[in-house]
Image (spheres, rainbow, N blue to C red):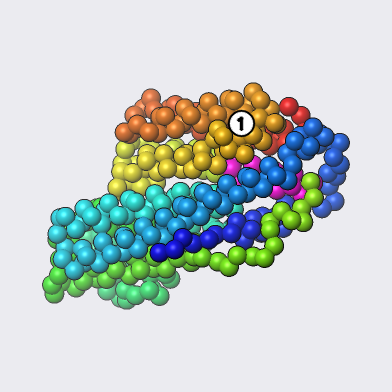
Amino acid sequence: MPPMRFPLFLLFKPLLVTVLLAGCGQSTDKASIGNHVLDSIDQSLITKIVDRFEEVYSDHSNRTVISIEAFQISVDNFLEDPRSERQQDMQMHWLKAHKGFLAASFFSFTNQNRNIFQIDAWPIQEGFLDSLPDYPQSGIINDLTLSINETSLRTQHGITDLQEVSLGFHALEFLIFSRAISDFSIGSDEIKARRRQTLDIVTALLKQDIDTMFGDTEQPDSDLLTDLDENNRFLLLRALLQRLQVKTQNLFSEVNHIDNENAGHSRFSGSSWSNLNVQIRVLSELTGEQTAMDRVFTLLDQKTAADYRLTLTGAKDILATDGPDEDKLARITLLFAALGHQLDDLRLKLENGTR
């Protein structure tokens, strides 16, 4: 499969419209934001940042599209012959596809809230989808008044509450990590047939939504930065810093959902800790040492930039370990909080033009 091209112009164009409209009527006098900062952060440096974001986005997006195809094949194989080794293969491909999605969507700068809700809604009320030990008749799968098809599953997704999830990675995670192989056995049992059908359809819809979110697009004729004067470049960089801070705040929120290895974002598969590891490494790819963004941070404030690098390295080192304990959770929570504050400090330095 040839590599797909994901022009970041298409991602940043809505962002640029937003920040430029927000800047209308506000003074962006060069002297007010610091000559030395704007002179150092020139178009070539911003271009390097955009190129880096585009490269990382394209790489992770391609991997996600490929991994979701492999996951769908593993589900087909399991449904054809439900047995232990095929279930394990399906679980392994789910983990790979989900981590790929987290990496690719970590730095999505367009408004992808709806797409992300379709693909990665969490937390979920698992009893909304299928039965629980104390509620053997619960869930869409056990409600014989509901048809199991694409339309009904899309309609039911978040129908009255955001945790009423019938689509995406975590509906599938619940089914393939929490249900016994016998729950998917081939035969005349109507509930098992509906569960098999649900697994098949939700997987197909997930692939469809992944392809929609990360599908190839036509390369635009104009370059992102061609018509940007230095004030607009300043607004673009400020918006990037704001978005990175939001992403870091999301990590802080995510770690606060973890109280043991099996809780949090991916509690059924026990992969919540490794989810954080995936995302912090993407943050490092975009802003770590030897990147153009790191150069901008250093120009803005050498001490804050150095502190940010140290904090980022500390977070990566902790998340590279096997799993959380009380001490690790306390430390990583503090590090995520520090990263958010440091990114905000750098944003303020950019706005004020001071070091």
Residue 148's place in the image compared with 275, above or below, is below
Q: Quadrant of residue 170?
A: bottom left
Mark 1: which secondary structure? helix
Is residue 134 rendered to the left or right of residue 35? left
User: How many other residues sit within 10 Å of disc 1, few (<14), some (14-19) or many (≥20)?
Assistant: many
Is residue 282 rendered to the left or right of residue 237? left
> Quarter of the image containing the C terminus?
top right
Residue displayed at 47% across by 52% down: 59
Q: Where is residue 14 in the image (x, y as percent from the top left)?
A: 66, 59
Give the residues in magenta. Answer: 231-245
Q: Position of residue 25 (x, y in %)?
A: 85, 51
Q: From the viewer's side, name the closer residue of 74 and 256.
A: 74
Is residue 60 rendered to the left or right of residue 49? left
Dominant SS of magenta comes to helix
- On the image, numbered disc 1 is attached to which residue? 342
> Quarter of the image containing the N terminus?
bottom left
Residue furthest front as drawn? 2
Residue 219 visible? The answer is yes
Residue 12's place in the image compared with 208, above or below, is above
Looking at the image, how many numbered discs can be counted on the residues?
Answer: 1
